[in-house]
Amino acid sequence: MRGNLIAVGRDYGLRLVILIAVLATFLVLSKGFRGPSSLYAILESFAFVGIVALGLAVTMIAGELDLSVASMAALMGVIAIEMAQFGLVVAILSATVGGFLLGALQGWAIAKLGINSLVFTAGSLILIRGLAYVVSNNAPVVLTDFEISDPLHVRFATYFSPSSVIAILLFIVVGIFLALTRPGRHIYAVGGARSEAIAAGVPVQRSLTLAFGISGGAAGLAGAIACLKGGSAAPEGFPDLLLLAVAAALIGGIGLYGGVGNIWHVVIGVAITGALTAGMATLAAPSYLNNLVLGILLVVLLVADFVIMQAARRRRLARLRQIVAEEGEIPADALPVGERVGTS
């Protein structure tokens, strides 16, 4: 029991402290933050930035990064508006499935060609943005019947909307997929130790295809919900979405080098960024100040993670030196791959 608590504290402690500090700060500074609207706004952030951060986190766990999510959200938002004439469900499903298929195509190409995902998706973000201009005929598209999107504006139980409920359900499904299914474990294996995963027969191409498909589908879903709620879509939409989603994933504790993090890290990261944004809004602070604080917070957490990782590595090596001194040898599995040391 104690070991489990220590592990939870190590994995989530710092982030939870920051989340509590952010909430406490705005509760003291802003009376407006104390009302139900702030919690509603935080939950709504899960339905946009949160969904995109969730998809990005899957590619990061796989040791990759999808830079095209903002363009994907814009393109699929346009498609959702165009498909809204067939009903709200059809519009959302069209954007989600379209994003999944286009994202999966990217993942397949990255794995098949062996191209770095940063390079590939840097190109595809431009290509997909161009497609958004083509599909929209280089102009914003608007709903012909605004009543179609009315169900998305319903607010129930004070704090929830259909959008936030969809986001919560998606987090649960993806969390179960990553933690309890074989394809999910394969994604962790591909990100954590790709050479060993290949040697063990893990299907790398299939795993990357699935990871990028999830990222594309999540971006498509988020873009569809945002555009349908707003009643229009623009091909140049969501310019800051990529940075916000990456910041949320990193602040939550998803590792940049693959194989690190889980769904709770994304939840905490989105909660922190959502609380920060909602709090700044109640103070009527300019948007650049919110970005400044978010950037400072991200840098502090990345430095803290590095320091903690180095301290843990030094403790591990000290323990191994003690084993060598006492027993004259190091157990074969005492060090992770890449940190094998010789003994004399």
Image (tube, grey):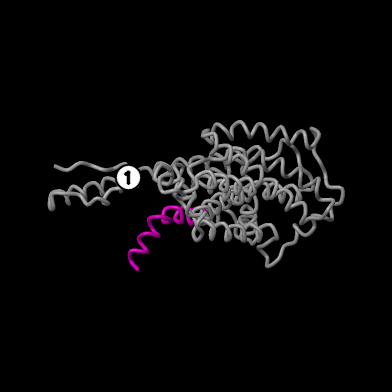
Q: Tag 1, which secondary structure?
A: loop
- Magenta residues span 1-22
Q: Main secondary structure of the magenta part?
A: helix
Query: Seen in the image, is 69 located left or right of residue 331?
Result: right
| Residue 248 visible from this viewpoint | no
Which image quadrant: the N terminus?
Answer: bottom left
Give residue 288's quadrant in the image: top right
Q: Position of residue 318 (x, y in %)?
A: 21, 47
> What residue type is disc 1 on?
Val
Which residue is labeled 1 in the image? 337
- Residue 5 colored in magenta in the image: yes
**In the rendered image, which quarter contains the C terminus?**
top left
In which image quadrant can residue 74 be found?
top right
User: Residue, x 76% and y 42% (percent of image)?
Assistant: 78
Report if residue 274 lies within the magenta region. no
Q: How many marks?
A: 1
Residue at horizontal 77 percent and vertical 33 percent from the top: 134
Q: Nearer the viewer, residue 97 or 297?
A: 97
Q: Nearer the viewer, residue 88 or 341?
A: 341
Pick the front one: 112 or 11: 112
**Residue 234 placed where, x, y %?**
75, 39
Please indicate whether residue 46 sits to the left or right of residue 180 in the image: right
